[in-house]
Image (cartoon, rainbow, N blue to C red):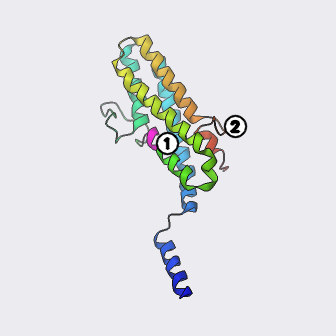
Amino acid sequence: MKKQALLMLLVLALVYPGNAQDDRQGLVPMLERFVTQLDLAIQQAAFGASAVTVEEARVQSRQVLNLAVGEGDTSFDSAIPRLGDGVGLNNYARRLLRFVEEIPELREYKVTAGNIAFFSQAASELLKASFRIQNAEELRRQIHIAQGLLLAARGAPGDLPSEGGVRTILALFPE
């Protein structure tokens, strides 16, 4: 009977390989893509914050929003040329929250992951609200604030866990 149970567990492990090790293997590439998309969004926000006209700022604002929400979101503007991978910063943040829940060694970074998700979502909401702004200076200011939120979500390798961002968690996995 014990042999049958062990054999059944082995078969289940082979058929359903989802485990913490597999989760860890997917984590680093996901974090690297997340940082790349954050860098792109931060760059586009910098362009928007320095735009001369309302129209230029609005296009950059929509670019950043598209990067934040991803192609599947109702706020995604397909009339704007797509930058990035189309996944969306908010979706990356949700994936990170799942990884933190599933991988025991990352549970101490639950606050960090929650902050990242908050900053990304807050930037999205701020950019959505900015569509009603008609004044170039005010629009640039809103984009600049969104840029600050995205910078906080990105973080730096040496940040404290409770104050860090994606780079803080990525630094846990040396190459």
Callout 2 amino acid: Gly
Residue at the spot 47% in from the left edge and 27% down from the top edge: 44
Callout 1 amino acid: Ala
Secondary element at tag 1:
helix
Q: Nearer the viewer, residue 19 or 53?
A: 19
Q: Which residue is denoted by mark 1 in the rendering? A: 93
Kindly tell me whether residue 72 is visible in this rendering: yes
Q: Is residue 22 located in the magenta-colored stretch of the structure?
A: no
Q: Where is residue 166 in the image (x, y as percent from the top left)?
A: 58, 40
Q: Is residue 91 located in the magenta-colored stretch of the structure?
A: yes
Residue at the spot 51% in from the left edge and 26% down from the top edge: 147
Q: Where is residue 40 in the image (x, y as percent from the top left)?
A: 49, 33
Q: Is residue 38 left or right of residue 138?
A: right
Q: Is residue 56 above or below residue 90?
A: above
Picture quadrant where residue 162 is located: top right
Q: Is residue 121 left or right of residue 164?
A: left
Tell me which segment is drawn in magenta: 88-92
Secondary structure predominantly adopted by residues drawn in magenta: helix
Q: Position of residue 154 (x, y in %)?
A: 57, 35
Marked residue nearer the N-terminal end (2 or 1): 1
Q: Which mark is residue 158?
A: 2
Kindly tell me whether residue 52 is visible in this rendering: no
Q: Is residue 59 above or below residue 158?
A: above
Residue at the spot 65% in from the left edge and 50% down from the top edge: 173
Q: Which of 162 and 32 is in front in this view?
A: 162
Q: Nearer the viewer, residue 77 or 19?
A: 19
Q: Position of residue 23 (x, y in %)?
A: 54, 57
Contact, CB < 8 Å: mark 2 with mark 1?
no
